Image: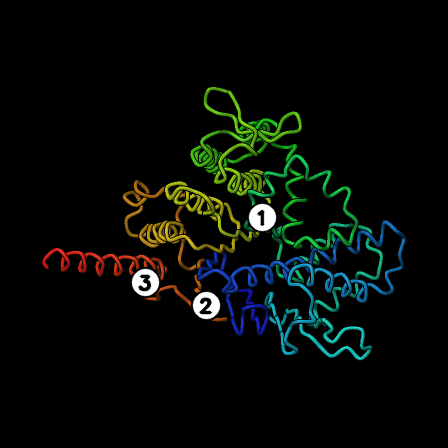
């Protein structure tokens, strides 16, 4: 399975993480969760960078003789757009991503002999990746051959999707996004965090598909070859999404709307901050399941501004998404999200013993399995595994830790109150 190691980048001193199909990161703010998430996205999209650069060279008629040099230049730019200038980084900073056996990429710093900048971002690829990059100097008659070879080389045939935190601001600006991006030059675009820019561009590409909402998309699709299992899952997802949103999303007449039960609607940028935060999480998850596109989604803080019940319902939707054959890295601060994930794990663990009874409590298409799941707690620049080996659940001490502190404070105050009344 893929593995990421990070040394001296941002708040992280040392961490190593094995990436199962579902990976959960939690811990205090500024502990490095986003740094890990971005690092994973950086490495997983090198495959996409290779393909897009090859296709661009073909369109321009380039001979591709300096492909590796151009690729490294693009990767340096992407790295700085994610993590900032290398000038302030430690010289022993190092990232390594292992895609599979003997397949890896590394990022490190070396001294720049030209003197223009003290730290120079450098890359090292395993032999099979280097050999693949060399093949991109030649002309391939069939684009599908390139896509297949890239997937085989990087051990990855998933589309990589980053859903960042702070989504409500993007929703507020939704009607201006096209204009904002169109007037920005390349240097101005590079000032936007790469993951946020990627998310914005993805939304702009997909928005028009939602003119009749997710149900319109579903009914257009079901006349083709949707199998009964997928139909049942998609119907369950649609009901879950309606329940979370308390309305139905549509993009009509150039504006995003939330249609209410009485068929009136509210423009999305006038809805609650929770609805603004969650709407494109829901849309994207549904889209990839409907289109049967395998996706690796990196999702930051899905709980933002949501009522606890809605947080629980979002976690259940994540289970549905995973059961459609997708993968996910999730960052969260929410005990409600973590608690619901534990319920889904518990159900998945019990299903073999008492399937019918378990399915009456937690729907089968929501259940998560511990052999596909890993969970880590990040703090003080390091990471620790928080999956309990014995019961195969996330340790309750992590989920309830802050509640214990609050309850302890409350008990002490009650004790002081009682003592003061006795005097």
Whether 84 is drawn above or below 230: the answer is below
The residue pinned by badge 2 equals 379
Q: Is residue 406 left or right of residue 298?
A: left
Mark 2: few/some/many CA within 10 Å (<14, 14-19, 20+): some
- Pointer 1: what residue? 294
Residue matched to label 3: 397
Q: Give whichever of discs 2 and 1 has the lower sequence position.
A: 1
> Is residue 130 among the parts visible in the rendering?
yes
Secondary structure category for the residue under label 1: loop
Furthest-left residue in this view: 422
Q: Residues within 10 Å of mark 3 (few under 14, many from 20)?
A: few
**Residue 113 at what x, y percent from top left?**
80, 80
User: Which of the marked residues, 3 or 1, is nearer the chain's N terminus?
Assistant: 1
Marks 2,1: beta carbons within 8 A: no
Of 260 and 291, the residue lying toward us: 260
Q: Which numbered disc flags the more N-terminal residue, 2 or 3?
A: 2
Q: Secondary structure at mark 3?
A: helix
SS of the residue at dot 2?
A: strand
Whether residue 285 is situated above or below residue 20 in the rendered picture: above
Compute the Cα span from label 2 to label 1.
Answer: 32 Å
Residue 356 is situated, as x and y percent measured from the top left of the image, at 30, 43
Figure quadrant of residue 66: bottom right
**Residue appearing at x 38%, y 63% in the figure:** 387
Query: Real-space Cα distance between discs 3 and 1?
Result: 34 Å
Image point (18%, 60%), residue name: 416
Q: Is residue 228 visible?
A: no
Q: Position of residue 375 (x, y in %)?
A: 43, 61
């Amino acid at each position: 399975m893929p593995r990421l190691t990070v040394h001296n980048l941002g708040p992280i001193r040392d961490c190593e993480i094995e990436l199962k199909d579902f990976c959960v990161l939690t811990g205090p703010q500024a502990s490095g969760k986003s740094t890990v998430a971005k690092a994973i996205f950086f490495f997983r999209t090198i495959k996409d960078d290779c393909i897009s650069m090859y296709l661009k060279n073909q369109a321009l008629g380039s001979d591709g003789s300096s492909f590796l040099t151009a690729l490294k230049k693009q990767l340096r730019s992407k790295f700085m757009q994610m993590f900032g200038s290398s000038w302030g980084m430690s010289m022993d900073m190092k990232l390594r991503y292992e895609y599979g056996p003997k397949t890896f990429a590394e990022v490190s710093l070396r001294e720049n002999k030209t003197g223009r900048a003290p730290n120079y971002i450098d890359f090292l690829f395993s032999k099979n990746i280097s050999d693949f990059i060399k093949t991109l100097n030649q002309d391939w008659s069939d684009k599908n051959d390139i896509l297949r070879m890239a997937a085989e080389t990087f051990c990855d045939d998933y589309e990589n999707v980053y859903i960042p935190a702070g989504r409500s601001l993007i929703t507020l600006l939704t009607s201006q996004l096209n204009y904002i991006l169109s007037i920005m030059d390349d240097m101005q675009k590079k000032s936007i965090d790469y993951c946020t820019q990627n998310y914005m561009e993805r939304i702009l590409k997909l928005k028009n598909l939602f003119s009749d909402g997710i149900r319109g998309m579903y009914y257009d699709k079901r006349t083709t070859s949707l199998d009964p299992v997928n139909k049942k899952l998609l119907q369950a997802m649609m009901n879950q999404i309606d329940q979370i949103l308390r309305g139905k999303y549509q993009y009509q007449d150039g504006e995003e709307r939330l249609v209410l039960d009485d068929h009136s609607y509210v423009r999305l940028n006038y809805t609650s901050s929770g609805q603004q935060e969650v709407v494109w999480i829901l849309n994207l998850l549904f889209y990839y399941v409907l289109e049967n596109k395998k996706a690796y989604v990196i999702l930051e803080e899905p709980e933002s501004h949501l009522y606890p019940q809605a947080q629980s319902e979002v976690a259940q939707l994540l289970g549905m998404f995973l059961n459609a054959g997708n993968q996910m890295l999730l960052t969260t601060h929410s005990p409600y999200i973590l608690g619901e994930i534990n319920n889904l794990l518990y159900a998945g663990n019990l299903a073999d013993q008492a399937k019918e009874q378990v399915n009456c409590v937690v729907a089968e298409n929501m259940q998560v399995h511990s052999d596909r799941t890993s969970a880590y707690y990040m703090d003080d620049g390091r990471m620790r595994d928080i999956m309990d080996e014995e019961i195969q659940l996330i340790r309750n001490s992590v989920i309830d830790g802050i509640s214990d502190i609050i309850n302890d404070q409350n008990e002490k105050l009650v004790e002081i109150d009682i003592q003061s009344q006795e005097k």
